[in-house]
Amino acid sequence: MLNMGKGFDFREFKAKQEKLALEWKSNGGKVVGHYCNYVPEEILHAAGILSIRLLGTTDNITHADAHIQSFVCKLIRAGLDMGLKGELDYMDGMVIPNTCDGMRLLFEIWKKNMDKGFLRLLDLPILIRQGLSQDRMRNDFGLFKRQVEEYFGKLILEEELSNSIRVYNENRTLLKELYNLRRKEEGIISSVEAYEAVLASLTWPKELSSELLKSMIAEANKKIAERKEVKSKPKVRFHVSGSVLTDLRILEIVEEFGGVVISDDLCTGTRYYWDNVEETGDPMKAITNRYIEKLPCPCKSPNDERHDFIFDSIRQGDVHGVIFVMEKYCDPHLFDYPLLRKQIMDMNIPTLGIESELGVSGQEQLRTRIQTFINVVQGGQ
Amino acid sequence: MLVAGVDAGSNAAKIVLMEEDQILSHGVLKTGANSLGAVKDLLQHILEQQHKKMEDISDIVSTGYGRNYIPFATFQATEIFCHAKGVFRTMPQVRTIIDIGGQDSKVIYLDNNGRVADFVMNDKCAAGTGRFIESLAMALSVPLEEMGPLSVSAGQEITISSTCTVFAESEVVSYVAQGFPKSDIISGVHHALAGRVVSMARRREIRREICLTGGVAKNIGVVRWIEKELGESVRIPEEPQLTGAIGAAMIALERARQQ
Amino acid sequence: MGNQSSPKKGRALKTSYEASTILRNYWETIHAAKKAGKPIGYCSGNAPVELMYAFDILPAYPENYAAVVASAKIALPLVQMAESKEFSHDLCSYAKINLGEVFWEGKGKPEMPFGGLPTPPDILLTTKIPCITQVKWWEVLRDVYHCPMILLDAPMLEGTVDNQPSEDQVDFVVDQLKLIIAQLEDFTHTKFNEEKFFHCLSLSDQAGGLWHDIIDLRGEAVPTPVGSREMCGNVFSLVAMLGTETPVKFYQKMKEELQYKTWKKIGAIPNEKYRLLYENIPLWYNLEMLSDVENKGAVFVFETYLRYVWGGRIDLTDPYRGYAKKILSDVFLNMNLQLRYDIMARDIKNYHIDGVVFHSNRSCKRYSLGYYELKEMLLERLGIPSVVIEADHSDPSGYSEGNTKMKLDAFIELLEERRNAGSRG
């Protein structure tokens, strides 16, 4: 199902994703785009809506610059550009969260230029560890559910929510299984394939994504079973830290020089699937609790648990280096980076910082840097 | 009535001498901002050719980045206004002027009387200016004036996605390394520039007709991409670089007539 | 401060000469307090600073201090130091100036005005009301100084000009204020002095009221008696001394002087032709930009930054809710785009504005994003032209003098053409 083995091409990935969405629509389904891991997709799913995480585009920006300055991240600019060019016209709505300042103002600009369909601001608190903000988050999610029901004219039943929770949990559990498998049997699944599978989960119908994951896992297990005693040569194992990683060519280069990515704290990685929803009790309460307690984003304060997640991963003893892929103009991540990096260096783990704008230009320079970094890491062993 | 317009730009100074509504003569001097003294010599040279003297000139208006450093000019106007006047003189149907210079690019929106209704300029980054093409021409070892003609034969589309000139250079270098034909790469460079500029122009309604000025207007590759992005054909003055100086001379004429 | 580069005529207002004394006194007081062992709290803009006074904690303002550093024209080495410590070039330059000082290593540190911020802070108080930067920046300070950090969460205000924050939003902020009080009781081991808090609120309200009167006086008067550059120097006591007597006295005096000047119709410039609105934070390293236009008969008579970021009235009949409402609704950066437009449209009318200068500020996304929409709305709905200049509030490294001057000159030419066209027919 995925375009494996012949090199990652985001354009092809996007084309496939759009084809799936159009199929969904032709079967009478609705489609809503969104921008964030804090959007309670279970609610949309329960209303029969396919929710698609916006991942931007590698095309030139031709319309967005007339509406937003160039000093905001490419994710914001590219999404706006796609919307303005009509590339998102197949969507019945768009949900933009109040996370960073860029996103909050993006909602305003979106509304001014494309106030159509189910366009909603998901206004979320920043202090997720505090009771007051948690109460507000419950209200915000409740409001969101009512808005979905009213706009799409569909009452969401409790059992539908419970079903969606199970569908999402299954998908997350599979992604986590894939993660564990990758980590334990490094190299059995390529880093590119694994992250492409997460991108698919973020943008495809969940049921389809789960099918794909099952077959990937089965195939990997088969490989393991058939494998002779000969162990593959030890690889250099990395943790990748950052927000969105859509240009998987970075991972291709890592693998080209004998590296492998075994863990991450990406928004398009563990932060999306690490935490499940309680399947017992009131489903809305369970959903809200999951988003309150999930592995946090740097747009939440404090987000120490993200940092601890990285440290814990390193303490497992199999991580040789950390690669930061930093989206340019992403203030929350960029503020975290210097001290986080220092803490990792203090654990005797080398780090490499790569600046990205939904991808890296200058492949040759990147090759040099990654190859050198891998040499550094190996020399340090 | 004899007047002169001086456009003291970042790469070149241009002078236009006008007798009433007619352009008598013009001159261009490749110069940096620090050799503005030479501008006076150029003016004197042009005057001599026409058998005129400095004292014959009723008014001199300067424009361009060095406009405040031309001691013999009696009035300073910004190049935005001078471009508007210069274009409107010969093409009164124009409502949108896209000016791509070496250092910056501007879009000027005119009302039906040729007055400036609004304008936008690129931010500090060079990606939307002629400098972008200059530096990539250098990276490709192609003379600047050949960039346009070369790109016309391009086959496939190549995307230069970086808006940073430095990163775009390394992107170009890696395309070369991968064996893409130069014509395709150059076309990609032109497309990137055209995309940036047109995107900026979209900040206001782009009314017809559209005129392209500045040195880059001579590059057929960029012109074609701009037309494609706009879905409109654009008009180009015969001497796109002189537009500013012509406009300055016209303001000088208006001033001289009022006196 | 920092005005060496351009010869400056005297101040338009006599009272303005007192601003520098107030500034010096503030810094002497806070350094003396630190020496005497009193707790110091680093407060972000729009944080509930009156609570600090109620607990006898003296507030210091890293953000305001960064502006002081920038106007002394010594920001660059500090910004570069922060960048060398891996803080991205694209982060807010206020934060980088402060972090450059915090992480300074080696020789060549510029002499910091007023002896620098008192260090270390004993507590940190911040809020997301103006921006998320103030949260992320404070988190770095928390990790450096290992001291408690208190954060006031707040939603952004939506709606139109007559809208107040919703009851839910006010409840949310009131509940948080009470929680912060409990946290401060824990921190200081003292009981909350509510009377003192209310007293500080009353002082803040008085200063805010006087400040609004001042803005109205200079905005409504034709010609305006004082331009932006001078007023940017006069806002300090409102920023750093809200909740104390000082701004109340200072602004009372300033208001009286303005009443006299407007009555006498004494203008800031001899021949006022164009009245401009300045939108966003000024270029602290180049305040001359605000007065340079005066040579061409243009003068800045109103700034959203001076009116809707600092100060604000408080309904003291219901202090907690009144305070929460003020916190939520008086800050331009915490308003949605429609509300910003409505307010600008109202003020453009009240203050007889001819044109708007937007400063698209790389360091402040929250303030700057949406400018192209606002620009279009102003022109299409009100016929008010505007220009966008690109710069940064305190990092001079990317500032292009030629480019900015050209845009402003062309903008004044445009205003002139419009006026000529109007008078002709």
Image: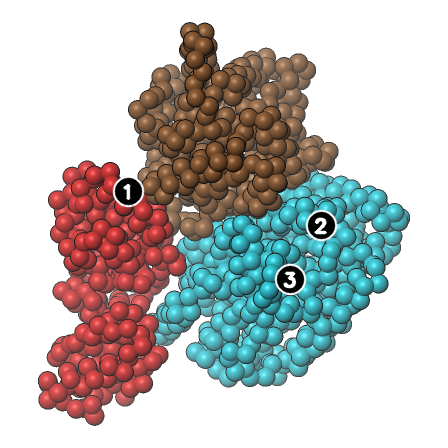
Chain colours: A brown, B red, C cyan
Local secondary structure at mark 3: helix
- Comparing labels 1 and 3, the label whose residue is closer to the camera: 1
Circle 1 chain:
B
Local secondary structure at mark 1: helix
Name the disc covering residue C63, or none.
none
Residue depicted at x 69% and y 68%: C115
Residue B187 seen in this snapshot: no
Mark 1 near mark 3, Cβ–Cβ under 8 Å? no
Query: Mark 3 sits on what residue?
Result: C64
Distance from disc 1 to disc 3, alpha carbons, whole Å, reads 46 Å
* Residue nearest the viewer, comparing C206 with B249: B249
The percent position of residue A119, horizontal first and vertical second, equals 48, 35
SS for dot 2? helix
Q: Amino acid at mark 2?
A: Tyr
Residue shown at 77% from the left, 45% from the top: C180
Whether residue B68 appears in this view of the structure is yes
The residue wearing badge 2 is: C145
B95 vs C165, left or right, is left
Specify the label residue B174 is tagged with: 1
Q: Alpha-carbon neighbours of circle 3 within 10 Å: few (<14), some, or many (≥20)? A: some
Q: Quadrant of the C terminus of chain B?
A: bottom left
Q: Earlier in the sequence, mark 3 or mark 2?
A: 3
Answer above or below: position of C305 versus A304: below
**Residue type at the position of mark 1:** Ser
Q: How far is mark 3 from mark 2, CA to CA?
A: 20 Å
